[in-house]
Image: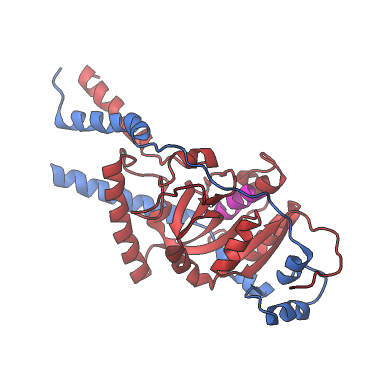
Amino acid sequence: MAPRQFVQALLLSFCLAACATTPTSDVDAFASRTDGNSFEPFRGRVDGPSALVLPVVHDQQIDGAACGAHALASVVNYWRGAGTVTGAGIFAASPPANAERGYSLAEMTALASAQGLVASSVRLNLPDLIRELESGRPVLVPVRLPSIYVQNRSLPGTDARPLSLARGLVMERVGRVSEFTALALVDHYLLLVGYDRDRFVVVEPVMGYRTISFERLARYRRSFDDAAVVFSAAAPERSTPASRS
Amino acid sequence: MRLSLASVLALSLAFTQVAAPTAFAQEPVQFRTVAPQAFTTEELQRYGLSAEDAAEVRALQEQGYQVRVLTPEEASQYSAGISNRTWWIIGAVVVIAAIVVAVDSD
């Protein structure tokens, strides 16, 4: 191989390797670049100490139908300590009954119970979601969204500001067409871990910490009629119900 | 050594991989956080998790709660996950787009 071809091959392989998107795996990495990987082409950044973000550690999805397992691993490790389980372990031990459709909410709550958590499938509106977060409890929500938002590959260089804006605009347009035509939509799980004035912070199984506006998340949740899974550590001893004021 | 346009492009893209994360990193943001709290007895009831029956949950809803517990049938029906077939479709679209761009640039 001639030196020139070698250099070209080397550069090309470097670029291809760099095409893998870099997930934002923990809250410290997210604090350094809050608009990285955002669902929003503009105003994806979280500013100021008023934003609430729970310190959940991302467990990266590597298999197709395993998003529920990886999201659940993040929840279990949040409640029971880092490294308690992995999504890959949950998926290997308890794959979804329907490998094409992924985990159902019923399967998710059963798996959470098996991991020592208390979980329930409910319908939550925006204030309810915020109330859960303010109680220090991440919430899992199923969403139907354009598949372009959950790629694990991107063009090299798109982390750079001008390119990331261009990419965001293209993705926004493609996503809108996808929503309008109902083509290339995928069902996915997002773990809500924080919020600020008009957007949520989510841990998405493929790319980790991302921001998404209240309005966009409501749109993506519509297909599931605002379904959600709430989690908690083991229940306290049952006592007389507290009266409401 | 003279470099072709493709080499220069590859070199510049490779450079952005190194330079961009540093150049566009923001000052770390301080967030608010709260300690995780287990469900209270009231919340257990609201989410249909207590030993009491669904009537008790309904009673709480009548007192103003917006939460509705999914039935077992609904919980089984709702599922989410990207199948491997979806990944292949996404990959195919990316490959086709790359080929189109490459052909156009020739």
Dividing the image into 4 quarters, which one contains the C terminus of chain A? bottom right
Q: Is residue A90 left or right of residue A6?
A: right
Residue at left 44%, top 45%? A34
Relative to B38, residue B52 above or below: below
> What segment is highlighted magenta in the picture?
A64-76
Residue at left 51%, top 53%? A202
Percent from the top left, x then y, of residue A160? 31, 39
Dividing the image into 4 quarters, which one contains the N terminus of chain A? top left
Q: Nearer the viewer, residue B106 or A42?
A: A42
Residue B89 visible, this angle: no
Check residue A65 for magenta coloring: yes
Relative to A60, residue A233 above or below: below
Q: Chain B in the picture: what colour?
A: blue
Percent from the top left, x then y, of residue A60? 54, 44
Chain shown red: that is A
Relative to A169, residue B29 above or below: above
Residue A29 visible, this angle: yes
Q: Main secondary structure of the magenta part?
A: helix
Residue at left 18%, top 32%? B6
